[in-house]
Image (cartoon, rainbow, N blue to C red):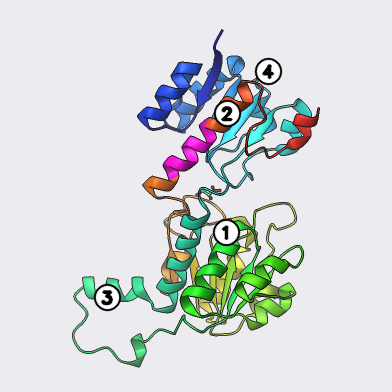
Amino acid sequence: MKKSVVLYKKLSAPLMARLHEQAEVTLIDALDETGLAKLRDALPSAHGLLGASLRLDAQLLALAPKLEAVASVSVGVDNYDIDYLTQRGILLSNTPDVLTETTADTGFALILATARRVVELADMVRAGQWNKNIGPAHFGSDVHGKTLGIIGMGRIGEALAQRGHFGFGMPVIYHSHSPKPAVEARFGAQYRSLQDLLKEADFVCLTLPLTAETEKLIGTEEFALMGPETIFINISRGKVVDEAALVEALAQRTIRAAGLDVFEKEPLSHDSPLLRLNNVVATPHIGSATHETREAMAKCAVDNLLQALSGERPQNLVNPAVWKQ
Ligand code: DGY
């Protein structure tokens, strides 16, 4: 008998067809109230779940006694109670690698947009306010040759370092759990303590996962270590930052600008103080959002789910302890 799979994210026609061949599929096509009610109704018979952008907590998962596997269409796994899944013997998988380059592109887009004030000045042109040659009041700052500081030297951090080092001749400094000799050899990157990195980098870029340890890692004290020319970039998770402290640093111009793809609460509220600051470039969590990459992520998640449901170890298993059990 086919196993039952609940999707809470729409997939492309070829991927849907593949899943239909191998499983009974229920699609929840929106995560609004109706969709969530449909999800709750479908959970009691679900063997597999696939989707993203939904907090799957113990309370919700308790409705799914037959659940064997959850395939997240994301690299970040902060939406899952991993201890609970592991205790229940449910395999959790994610989609690393396929989104690394695209997410690093997003990081670099924000570096360039903030340093060269691309959004602010393009808005000025669109508003018909380009009436004379621009002068120093509209100048930005260079990116090439500036110091790139990366906090969290995982795959995405490395891809950012590669762009900075080879593309823009930037000295790279980084902070992570431990020094990474291979990264140092490839990009001439140098390890720093968090405090030293914040003091030294022209661009402070966050590429680390959200965990209990990294929540609110960057707050008032950390912003105070940055200089008035520092540009802050976040492509990891909003909750790694104390957003009120960030607003304060930007409003007081104790740092120069911020390029933000992620926020404490998403979607960002229309009346967020961040949106009243012209030194902020805010994007709607587009890290991996290209047609090619989102399809590759969905395919990777489908592969992981089908592997798990057929008794194979999923390629991107997040909680290997379940496999050992
Ligand atoms: C991820 O995969 O975790 C990204 O944040 C989604 O773009």
Task: Residue at 63%, 63% (x, y): give it.
Answer: 242
Reading the image, the residue beneath label 2 is 305
Q: Gap between marks 3 and 2, in whole Å?
A: 48 Å
Residue 274 belongs to magenta span = no
102, above or below 323, in the image: below
x and y percentages locating residue 310 in the rendered image: 62, 20
At mark 3, the secondary structure is helix
Mark 3 or 4: in front is 4
What amino acid type is highlighted by mark number 2? Answer: Leu
Asked whether disc 3 touches disc 4, contact meaning CB atoms under 8 Å apart, the reply is no
x and y percentages locating residue 87 in the rendered image: 78, 30
| Quarter in which the N terminus is drawn | top right
At mark 2, the secondary structure is helix
Mark 4 or 1: in front is 1
What amino acid type is highlighted by mark number 4? Answer: Pro
Q: Gap between marks 4 and 1, in whole Å?
A: 36 Å
Give the extent of the magenta segment. Answer: 294-302
